[in-house]
Image: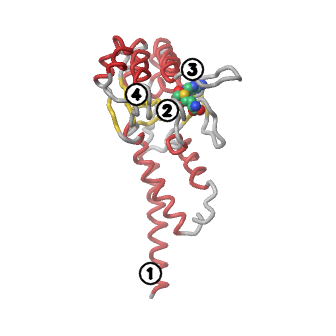
Amino acid sequence: MNTALANIRIVLVGTSHPGNIGSAARAMKVMGLDRLYLVAPEAPFPSSRATALATSGDDILERAIVVEELLDAIAGCGLVLGTTARLRSLPLPVLDPRAAATRSLAEASSHEIAIVFGREKSGLSNDETRLCHYLVNIPTSKEYHSLNLAQAVQVVTYELHMAALSALPGEIDPPDWQPQPPERMEVYFQRLEQSLLAIGFLNPEQPKRLMQRLRRLYQRARPDENELNILNGIVSATLDLTRERRAKKDQ
Ligand code: SAH
């Protein structure tokens, strides 16, 4: 297998039809991807229907990792792409599958990448979308935007395969930063929120979309370890100062 593709995982969230899980595995197999994560599948899994539709992709199903939360499926990933048929009111930057594949291949030799697909009926929730760095939208006709889940996996994995075929060695050199994975960013976002509440910048009565907007800003920047340490240091200093002030007032 192309080594860069080995760092790319396909994540299916809350899939309700076992046939879609099987067809997604087949779609991955023919395009040379083999790491499948299932987040809280609604479909019974393992399932004979999934295995039948996977055909030669059944080994992918056997090795599929089932987890409860999206955060567990994308743990350790430096780049998380969320596929969506809809573009939301506070969108992340949007890539088409070709641009998503080029970006993925450029980064895959230095860190893990997750491409996330939503539920057949409702797609990804807002909370799930917030964990992504980019959205990926497959351009469609204006009348109807929603592909079958496994067909969406096919389009995206085809582009990954094409990008892997055409990538020149120089194009997949690792960039010199290692973006921090979602589980570390989530801890930071919670601490940031606490500190903004402590200094009165975030009004819990009227939070508006402050945290959402800040998340988007940091997700765009994708801080590396040093940068995240600095950001966490600022939060710690802010929290220490507000605690000291409060202690003085109480004296
Ligand atoms: N009604 C849902 C559609 C879900 S289709 C919605 O509005 O979000 C199931 C999944 O297939 C989606 O969550 C997405 O991961 C993928 N998908 C379907 N159509 C797509 C498109 N045009 N672009 C990108 N992903 C798509």
Q: Position of residue 68 (x, y in %)?
A: 36, 41
Residue on which disc 1 sits:
247
Mark 1 lies within 8 Å of ligand 1 (Cβ measured): no
Tell me the CA gap for discs 1 and 2: 49 Å
- For mark 4, give the secondary structure: strand
Residue marked by disc 4: 9
**How far across and how far down the image is residue 113, in percent?**
43, 31
In the rendering, at what x and y percent does residue 200 appear? 58, 69
First in sequence: mark 1 vs mark 3:
3
Q: Secondary structure at mark 1?
A: helix
Q: Which corner quadrant of the image does residue 53 belong to?
A: top left
Label 1 – label 3 distance at C-alpha: 56 Å
Dot in front, 4 or 3: 4
Q: CA distance from mark 1 to mark 4?
A: 48 Å
Mark 2 crowdedness (10 Å alpha carbons): few <14, some 14-19, many ≥20 = some
Residue 100 visible at all: yes
**How far is disc 2 from disc 3 in space, using C-alphas?**
22 Å
- On-image quarter of the C terminus: bottom left
Instruction: Tell me the residue that label 2 is attached to.
Output: 119
Q: CA distance from mark 4 to mark 3?
A: 17 Å
Q: Secondary structure at mark 2?
A: loop
Lateral position of residue 123 relative to residue 60, left or right: right
In percent of width and height, residue 64 lies at 32, 27
User: Of the numbered discs in the image, which one, if any, rests on residue 205?
Assistant: none
Give the mark nearer the N terminus: 4 vs 3.
4
Residue 39 in which image quadrant = top left
With 157 as the anchor, is 204 left or right in this view? right
**Colouring chosen for the image of the structure:** secondary structure
Q: Which residue is mark 3?
A: 98
